[in-house]
Image: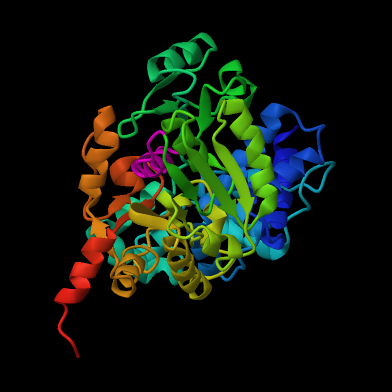
């Protein structure tokens, strides 16, 4: 493809992302499936350009609006060219209207290009939130969570995420997996925090590797690996992954149980559970059962109350911690907003708590960095459930990851992982132990009567 044809495809794809109520990665995948004539190098270049525009959307939009324009796919692509150093005449040649090229620039767009010439992406008059690509709906909460690290962490969220793999201990050690990946031409190194993690250089086609097909490794962010390991599931236990989704954490939990005991993967999206079964088979996992639920009040929950040693609730959330992977999530709703998510999370946590046996542990996790979805949610749960006691994150780490040689957690009493500090997606986890019946009764007796 010519540079003009790539630019036209970029603008077309960005328009589809704006118009389609689906995540950007799904829209990109569908776009290229419909256009198999586009070669691999062109697909990579177009995808990279689209994601660059998504990651710069606030700053590009600020410049466009400063000169009276409207931030749409064409003007975003034009502004990116000029602010990246292209001369207006060179940009106009790309927008030629020729075969497979974008339509010619309008007079207003040519004027915008002339006004942008000589400038760079940054300007000292830009508000900090624009420089940080932070949407108004999340700014207050993120400032509360990050304090003086607000700008640093948001800058890290503008960078593409690394590619992490989790070694399947049912199949190999990390050293064996590293050696096999090297033999397959993959450059990789151990992750810093996860004792089962491998960080890969570049963007190789992992799914085409024999080590992946044979279940030696799974694609999973290091932070997500840590949350699954911190569940502390042991061989022979009964465990529920309450919002299992595509089954990434389920796989990690089942592997740590060495196929002994039972893991129930539940979700309201039955289709995702069905697709996860292929992952279970490839990994050699035999102790997982998939169970679709109608909602947080499904009768199955009542029938199995107080039956499980570990219950993990990786709750639906705003996904602010995954903006490196999903930059479009900043600017358009792809599901419920915070006003719906926060009460949903509380209901899911309360429902899942019924499954925990006395002496068992409940783990609440999100891929969010917003206090309203994280520590305030945990505090509200504890206030409403006196039969549960908090477990310090450092203690949970020493009991689980610490036994595998991992370092101490970066925060306490909750686990808070962030991109700039920890090199992971943003993740949160809180841990609650259900008190033994005798302990709970003794506590009740000690309380004064009203």
- Identity of the residue furthest to the top in this view: 183
Residue in the picture at 75% in, 28% down: 39
**Which quarter of the figure has residue 413?**
bottom left
The answer to which of 311 and 164 lies nearer the viewer is 311
Q: Quadrant of the C terminus?
A: bottom left
- Identity of the residue furthest to the right in this view: 99
Residue 351, compared with residue 48, is above or below; it is: below
Residue in the picture at 74% in, 33% down: 2
**Which quarter of the figure has residue 211?**
top right
Residue 64, compared with residue 26, is above or below; it is: below
Q: Quick check: can you spot residue 215?
A: yes
Left or right: 407, with 6 as reference point: left
Left or right: 149, with 104 as reference point: left
**Which quarter of the figure has residue 446?**
bottom left
Q: Position of residue 313 (x, y in %)?
A: 45, 55
Q: Position of residue 75 (x, y in %)?
A: 64, 58
Q: Quadrant of the N terminus?
A: top right
Give the magenta-colored segment's residue range: 221-235
Residue 260, compared with residue 171, is above or below; it is: below
Q: Quick check: can you spot residue 125?
A: no
**Residue 274 is one of the magenta-drawn residues:** no
Dominant secondary structure (helix, strand or loop) of the stretch shown in magenta: helix
């Amino acid at each position: 493809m010519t540079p003009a044809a790539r630019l036209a495809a970029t603008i077309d794809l960005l328009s589809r992302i704006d118009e389609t109520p689906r995540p950007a990665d799904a829209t990109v995948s569908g776009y290229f499936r419909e256009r198999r004539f586009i070669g691999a190098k062109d697909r990579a270049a177009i995808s990279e350009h689209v994601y660059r525009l998504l990651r710069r959307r606030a700053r590009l939009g600020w410049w466009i609006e400063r000169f009276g324009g409207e931030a749409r796919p064409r003007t975003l692509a034009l502004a990116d060219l000029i602010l990246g150093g292209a001369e207006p005449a060179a940009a106009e040649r790309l927008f030629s209207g020729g075969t497979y090229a974008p339509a010619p620039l309008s007079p207003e767009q040519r004027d915008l290009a002339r006004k942008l010439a000589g400038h760079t992406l940054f300007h000292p008059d830009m508000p900090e939130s624009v420089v940080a690509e932070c949407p108004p709906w999340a700014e207050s909460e993120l400032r509360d969570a990050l304090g003086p690290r607000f700008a640093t962490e948001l800058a890290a969220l503008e960078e593409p995420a690394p590619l992490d793999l989790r070694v399947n201990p049912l199949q190999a050690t990390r050293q064996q997996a590293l050696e096999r990946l090297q033999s397959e031409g993959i450059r990789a190194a151990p992750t810093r925090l996860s004792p089962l993690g491998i960080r890969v250089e570049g963007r190789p086609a992992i799914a085409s590797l024999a080590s992946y097909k044979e279940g030696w490794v799974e694609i999973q962010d290091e932070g997500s690996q840590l949350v699954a390991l911190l569940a502390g599931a042991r061989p022979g236990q009964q465990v529920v992954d309450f919002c299992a989704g595509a089954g990434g954490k389920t796989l990690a939990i089942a592997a740590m149980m060495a196929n002994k005991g039972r893991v129930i993967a539940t979700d309201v999206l039955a289709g995702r559970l069905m697709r996860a079964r292929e992952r279970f088979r490839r990994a050699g996992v035999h102790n997982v059962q998939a169970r679709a639920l109608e909602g947080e009040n499904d009768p199955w929950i009542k029938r199995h109350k107080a039956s499980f040693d570990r219950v993990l609730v990786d709750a639906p959330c705003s996904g602010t911690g995954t903006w490196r992977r999903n930059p479009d999530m900043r600017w358009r709703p792809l599901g419920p907003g915070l006003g719906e998510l926060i009460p949903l999370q509380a209901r899911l946590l309360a429902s899942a708590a019924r499954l925990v046996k006395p002496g068992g542990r409940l783990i609440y996790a999100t891929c969010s960095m917003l206090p309203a979805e994280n520590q305030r949610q945990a505090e509200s749960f504890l206030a409403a459930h006196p039969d549960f006691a908090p477990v310090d994150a450092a203690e949970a780490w020493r009991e689980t990851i610490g036994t595998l040689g991992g370092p101490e957690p970066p925060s306490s009493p909750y686990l808070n992982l962030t991109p700039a500090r920890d090199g992971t997606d943003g993740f949160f986890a809180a841990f609650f132990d259900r008190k033994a019946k005798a302990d709970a009764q003794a506590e009740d007796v000690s309380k004064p009567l009203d």
